[in-house]
Image (cartoon, helix red, strand yellow):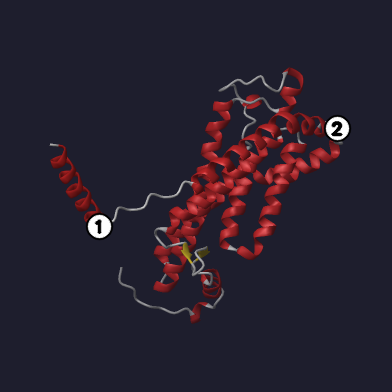
Amino acid sequence: MDRLLDVLKAIFTRLTRRLETRNPLPQMPGTGSAVRLINILAIAFLVFAAIVIVIDPVVSGAARMVDEDVEHTIMDFSIAGKGNWILFPAAIACILGHAAAVLMPVYRLRVVTMHLATLAGYIFWAVAAPGILVAILKQLVGRPRPFYGFEHGYWDFSPWSGYDFASFPSGDTCNAFALAMALGLMFPRLRPAFFVYAIFVGSGRIIGNLHFVSDVMAGAAIGAAGAYVMARVFLYGRNVFDVNSKGCIVLRGRKAVTLLWRWLTRRRKNWPVVSVRV
């Protein structure tokens, strides 16, 4: 009986080896990248916790000693992070652009106008999508703002309690970094200037004693990541963005604005009239 079992075991082993040779099983991905990612996330969490516990109270206390005139001046400039002046013009440009495209007498200009309208739509969603997420997180976390926490305690969390408990994350910083990322993807050469503007807005929120450093950092990360994710979404239609040979996201139709401007500034008698079938 033992001999028969040994023979069957040898036959099974041989068949298994043949099957693995002909149809090898897919290799399991290595755990090195997963372990590295976990380590990076753990280190980022520890650094962020250290900022919340140590740096936030110190910087908030220093911000209270800033001269009022300087504080008001910086706050006036940091109002550029408000979502209203970004979202409303982008939405109006998108709607009017699609409406104007129907009236264009030349097919090529119609395509250009549609492209610019879609570009305005991307700017709208690049700022609106992370902004919605931040607005929800603000109420869920309920972190007190620095001016309130200085008197009542920095750890007096109270979700869904209004403006005074909507510090984390910073909404204006999220809007500024989302717009900076969106414009930076469109115009890479001006990307440093866009992010300088975003950093200025975030710094103004700290100096104005409206947000902690960790609030600004979280808002910046969510805004930039949200704008990039929306760029990946618009990439599927290849209407706004494309991927170059290096795998980077690039803007399509860079000459669209120049072409439309030249057409609009030409004299009426020189406008081309072409019949277009729709």
Check residue 65 in the rendering and tell me which mark sits there, or answer none.
Answer: 2
Residue 242: x %, y % from top left:
46, 64
Residue 220: x %, y % from top left:
63, 44
- Local packing at callout 1 (Cα closer than 10 Å; few below 14, some 14-19, many 20+) is few
Q: Which residue is mark 1?
A: 23
Q: Number of numbered discs present?
A: 2
Mark 2 vs 1, N-terminal side: 1
Task: Name the quadrant of the N terminus.
Answer: top left
Which of 260 and 217 lies nearest the eye of the viewer? 217
Residue 187: x %, y % from top left:
60, 63
Residue type at mark 1 is Asn
Residue 117 appears left or right of 139: left
Residue at 56% across, 51% down: 89
Task: Name the quadrant of the C terminus.
Answer: bottom left
> Under tag 1, what secondary structure?
loop
Residue 151 appears left or right of 10: right
Residue type at mark 2 is Met
> Under tag 2, what secondary structure?
loop
Q: Please tell me in which quadrant of the rendered image residue 219 appears.
A: top right
Residue 273 appears left or right of 195: left
- Local packing at callout 2 (Cα closer than 10 Å; few below 14, some 14-19, many 20+) is few
Q: Please tell me in which quadrant of the rendered image residue 212 appears.
A: top right
Residue at 67% across, 53% down: 195
